[in-house]
Image (cartoon, helix red, strand yellow):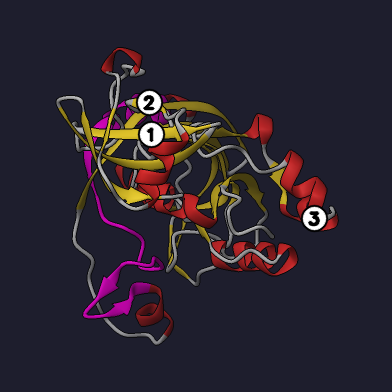
Amino acid sequence: MNENLQGWINLYKPKEISSFSAIYKIKKKFNIKKIGHAGTLDPNAEGILPIAINKATKLIPFINLNSKKYYFTIKWGEQTTTDDADGEKINYSYKIPTNENILNMIDHFVGNIGQVPPKASAIKINGKRAYTLLRDKKKFDLSEKKVFLKSIKFLGSQNNTSSFFIECGKGFYVRSLARDLAYKLDTFGHTTEIKRTKVGNFNNNTSILLDDLLKIGQSEFEFNFIYSSTSMLDDILAYEVEKESDLFDLSLGKKIFINKKKLIKRPLSSDNKALVFLSNKGNIVSFGELIGDLFQPHKVLT
């Protein structure tokens, strides 16, 4: 693959494969020099996995991870070591909450809440991943983290399971929500199905299944399934660079003058409010700081 080609893949990751394994298969198939992903999905979860190609990997921090949507199912009456169906059962209850009980409780989880991640997670404790410590049967505790749940919708129940749809921010664990909701309803619970339907501008409508992607040829892949680096970044202050001399100066890390009247003025996803993204023909070529009419590059992607 041309190393100058950059952009995004809107991948739909299947179950029973890690996010790392999914991108490794793509990298090997299409001979991609550099590849990365945002918003890791658990191996037993399926759904949208944003993937960056080549120099677009530098833009991963600017994907809007504060807007994620999930569909999931809780099985009531059983708690597991991993808070999903893959773990060992550790607690049981015969109590199955009614629809009325569930509807009365779910709104208590909306907003900024404290959440303890599942022990089967990638969080590091003294340099080791929590899931490794769990697998080795080591005793440990995880600290509570502040997360945000924008909305939750109860979709209905069948036998001893109930389904939900949520919109949440970054760092949110669906498995923890299932566990904690069950506790509040005086029972136990774990997830049996998790589907992520949206991450920022990445959604189901334009995604491609991993198996389908791995069946296509190189030219079809590059032409149809790599989105420009600007297309998946929302809420950015952007400016289109047109002069070849400016592109050359940027490639050397030099400052350039820009016409602020041509800035696309929108709020920023980044915490750095002075950050400006420069684009050329759909791809980000640099991002940095704007001081008056002078652009100072922080990173150059040309």
**Magenta region, residue range:** 101-130
Residue labelled with disc 3: 218
Work out which residue is located at the far top of the displayed protein and give it: 261
Whichever of labels 2 and 1 marks the residue nearer the N terminus, that label is 2
CA gap between label 2 and label 1 equals: 5 Å
Q: Quadrant of residue 275?
A: top left
Disc 2 target residue: 239
Residue at the location (19% across, 31% down)?
273
Between discs 3 and 2, the one toward the N terminus: 3
Give how far apart the Cα atoms at labels 3 and 2 are.
31 Å
Q: Quadrant of the N terminus?
A: bottom right
Residue 32 shown left or right of residue 289 in the figure: right
| Residue at left offset 32%, top offset 41% | 287
Contact (Cβ within 8 Å) of mark 2 with mark 1: yes
Q: Residue 63: in sight, yes or no?
A: no
Three-letter amino acid code of the residue under disc 3: Gln
- Kind of element beneath mark 3: helix
Dot 2 amino acid type = Tyr
Residue on which the image places disc 1: 278
Residue closest to the eye, 160 or 130: 130
Q: Is residue 248 above or below residue 293?
A: below
The first of marks 3 and 1 along the sequence is 3
Q: Of helix, strand and loop, which one carries label 2?
A: strand
Q: Which label lies toward us, 3 or 1?
A: 1
Question: Is 256 inside the magenta-drawn segment?
Answer: no
Neighbour tally class for label 3: few under 14, some 14-19, many 20 plus, Cα within 10 Å: few
Mark closer to the observer (3, 2): 2
At which x and y percent is residue 33? 59, 66
Q: Nearer the viewer, residue 150 or 277?
A: 277
CB contact under 8 Å: marks 3 and 2: no
